Amino acid sequence: MSPQLLTLVIQLLLLFAPAPTTVTSHYNYNFTSTSPPSQSEWRPARATFYAASDPRDKVGGACGYGDLEKAGYGQATAGLSEILFDRGQICGACFELRCVEDIRWCIPGTSIIVTVTNFCAPNYGFNPDGGGHCNPPNKHFVLPIEAFEKIAIWKAGNMPVQYRRIKCRKEGGIRFTIDGSDIFISALISNVAGAGDVVAVKIKGSRTGWLPMGRNWGQNWHINANLKNQPLSFEVTTSDGLTVTSYNVAPKNWNFGQTFEGKQFES
């Protein structure tokens, strides 16, 4: 066969050959992604309740909010298991919960919105599938019975639920409760809308620049600085990266033990 004829045959074969097939994988192999999950995604967990006479609402729990009724959180609160609590970083965040998988105890078509105010400590005397409801790796919510009974009959006990992170809606502005002594200043940041969980706080006096505060525990933040006889301003950043600045929230004659209200995140 001549070279010219061979070239013609190859061109004809390429012309009538079927097009290559593109195969699209249904699996995501990008295991290094650190993007947060969608806030609208429902996830499985379990929930139990505590009685109305339980004193934990008065002491305020691991987030440091104090008396939850006086702080404005009421009964729409939750304590989270260790895997969800994230050493208090999640304090102030809001979740929507609904009862699932049990037509005997679930109240159909209902859900509740709660703010994280407490920690459900693990009990290593039990295994996670036994009495250790809040042991790792369990995702568990402990609710006031008033909140629990909005989505399920109390006899349900350890109830399967679904949860998802949502934006917090709060009345009024962010609250700053100032405590401490001399140059040690502590500020409890509460009633935070939007993402709800505060990740950074700065404070400023009239004679200083912006000073970063450190997380003491929960949503209590502290600094060693002489800020007496100065009006105080605060800069609050939440986990979604948004920042709200409240200028001159506390007047020049502020005192320890007082609470002041600043601006608020959009919800």
Image: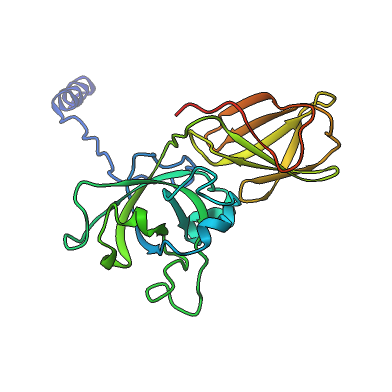
Viewer-proximal residue, 257 or 93? 257
Viewer-proximal residue, 213 or 75? 75
Identified at 16% across, 59% down, the residue is 103
Give the total number of marks visible in the rendering: 0
**Where's residue 253, x and y in %?**
79, 30
Q: Quadrant of the C terminus?
A: top left
**Where's residue 251, x and y in %?**
74, 27
Identified at 74% across, 36% down, the residue is 212
Q: Quadrant of the N terminus?
A: top left
Identified at 49% across, 63% down, the residue is 120
Q: How is the image coloured?
A: rainbow
Identified at 71% across, 43% down, the residue is 257
Horizontal side, residue 18 vs residue 155: left or right: left
**Where's residue 112, x and y in %?**
33, 47
Q: Quadrant of residue 52?
A: bottom left
Would you place residue 69 above or below residue 194 in this image?
below
Would you place residue 1 above or below residue 222 in this image?
above
Q: Residue furthest left?
A: 16
Viewer-proximal residue, 111 or 130? 111
**Where's residue 37, x and y in %?**
41, 42
Q: Residue furthest bottom?
A: 125
Q: Quadrant of residue 248?
A: top right
